[in-house]
Amino acid sequence: MLRTYSLKHDKRDEIEDLLWAYNRMLNGMLYDIWSTVRWKRVDIKGKHQFRLIPIFRKDNGFKRFLRNKYLEGWVYAAHWVDSALKTASSIIESWRKNYIKGERKRVQPKARRLFIRVKQTLCKLEGEKLRVTVAPRQFVYFNLSKRYFKLPAMVSSNGIGEPIITLDKIHLPIHAPDTKSETLAEKMAWDSNLL
């Protein structure tokens, strides 16, 4: 089970430029992905009506093109470009699902809030601090000592997921054991001992 905990931080001055650069890049990627949309006509059964379903390019060649395009002149770590590409794809997919349900209009989605999604390759736990790579050999350290939850031993798929950082908060997704499944497993073991 994944639980997300939020903590305030005081690193606004150190990360604000990165947040703005990431936001511009993310919106640029959303525009580039949106420009590839093709609208497929799908007839509605039993009616003389149709729906337009969006289809986007998702192939590796297009992703490689976007990555190379946004790496040009990028002064921060290259992994931020990968993070933005993953986030842009996620935003487009979320918009598409909501559009098909009838909850969105045929308007390109945009990232309005300032945030960055930190890939696991960009962060490392060092005691009570989370080290985040901003640029090659340039780091920001977030103090986690005032937390109200237990930290896992490492940043990994079994420990901390991909943190999200805003101007004043850090949101840490922590993998916690599922107490319901543990209880069920214990119950099953207990029942098998009775047989």
Image: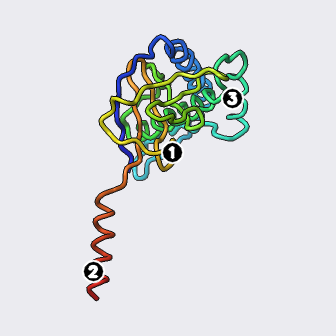
Which residue carries the number 3 mark? 67
Left or right side of 41 for 95 = left
Q: Residues within 10 Å of mark 1 (few under 14, many from 20)?
A: few
Residue 191: mark: 2
As measured in the structure, the alpha-carbon distance from the residue carrying label 3 to the one carrying label 1 is 32 Å
As measured in the structure, the alpha-carbon distance from the residue carrying label 1 to the one carrying label 2 is 53 Å
- Kindly identify the residue that appears in the image at 60 percent across and 31 percent down: 85
Which residue carries the number 1 mark? 42
Find numbered disc 3 in the image and state the secondary structure of the residue it sits on: helix
- Whether label 3 touches label 2, CB < 8 Å: no
- Kindly identify the residue that appears in the image at 45 percent across and 19 percent down: 114
Find numbered disc 2 in the image and state the secondary structure of the residue it sits on: helix
Q: 18 and 137: which one is in front?
A: 137
Q: Which label lies toward us, 3 or 2?
A: 2
Left or right side of 36 for 177 = left
Left or right side of 166 for 23 = right
Q: 155 and 48: which one is in front?
A: 155
Q: Residue 35: x percent and y percent? A: 61, 26
- Tag 2: residue type? Asp
Counting residues from the start of the chain, the first of labels 1 and 2 encountered is 1
Q: Residue 189: x percent and y percent? A: 32, 76
Counting residues from the start of the chain, the first of labels 3 and 1 encountered is 1
